[in-house]
Image (tube, helix red, strand yellow):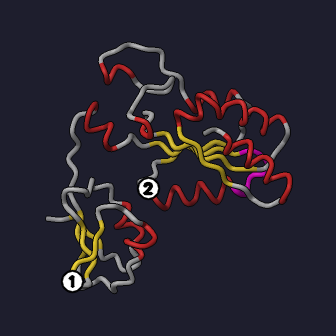
Amino acid sequence: MGSSVSTASGFSKATGRPIIAFIGDSTFFHSGITGLINAVHNNHKLTLVILDNETTAMTGHQPHPGVDMTLLGQPNTRISIEEVVRGAGVKQLTVVSPRKVKETMEAVKKSIAFDGVSVIISKEICPLYAKRVAPPAKARAFMVNQNRCKNHRDCVNLFACPAFYVEDNQVKINDNLCIGCAVCAQVCPEKAIIPKK
């Protein structure tokens, strides 16, 4: 809970190797900002990935300073994570959508190569929270084209989306769990995952 930035700073000094730390948006606000400021001040070399899902998803969707409370019918002053990061002195900052795998990977490579503290803000509203507060999006479920699938099961074992399951020795996707994010289709080496018609 917030120690990722400070721990990464220690690892960067002790190992001299590229270090990547992760922190959620809510945790960033309540205990990550001071570690980030310290890392910048002490010229550490690390990449911090802030997982901004626009809520405190881990403990029940409580609001934090970065939440748009107008979605809940309550006016507030929303604090921008991006502005806080820039205000802390971070020179290398990238905001990505985690659903865009290629762009996200390029941002990670660029950030790791940066000589100093770099930050990636991975911004995507929590799907469960979105169902409560945002207008419903038209999401098409995906399916596995069994003619293309080589049954290597990286989608199940490495990607590990809960919508995937194995039945009769074939990988399948549960329509009720698939949110249509399309990330699986981008990472499948055979391009066997396609939108359901």
Could you tell me which residue is drawn at 74 percent across and 42 percent down?
A: 6
Query: Tag 1, which secondary structure?
Result: loop
Could you tell me which residue is drawn at 13 percent across and 65 percent down?
A: 197
Q: Which residues are magenta?
A: 112-117
Image quadrant in which you'd find residue 19 = bottom right
Quadrant of the rendering where the N terminus is positioned? top right
Residue type at tag 1:
Asp
Image quadrant in which you'd find residue 85 = top right
Residue type at tag 2:
Lys
| Badge 1 vs badge 2, beta-carbon distance below 8 Å | no
Residue 101 appears at what percent x and percent y? 46, 60
- 25 up-or-down from 14: above or below: above
Q: Residue furthest top?
A: 75
Residue underneath mark 1: 168
- 47 up-or-down from 190: above or below: above
Relative to the observer, which residue lies in front, 127 or 62?
62
Around disc 1, counting alpha carbons within 10 Å, would you say few (fewer than 14), some (14 to 19), or many (20 or more)?
A: few
In the image: residue 149, left or right of residue 21? left
Query: Tag 2, which secondary structure?
Result: loop
Residue 77 appears at what percent x and percent y? 48, 15
Residue underneath mark 2: 100
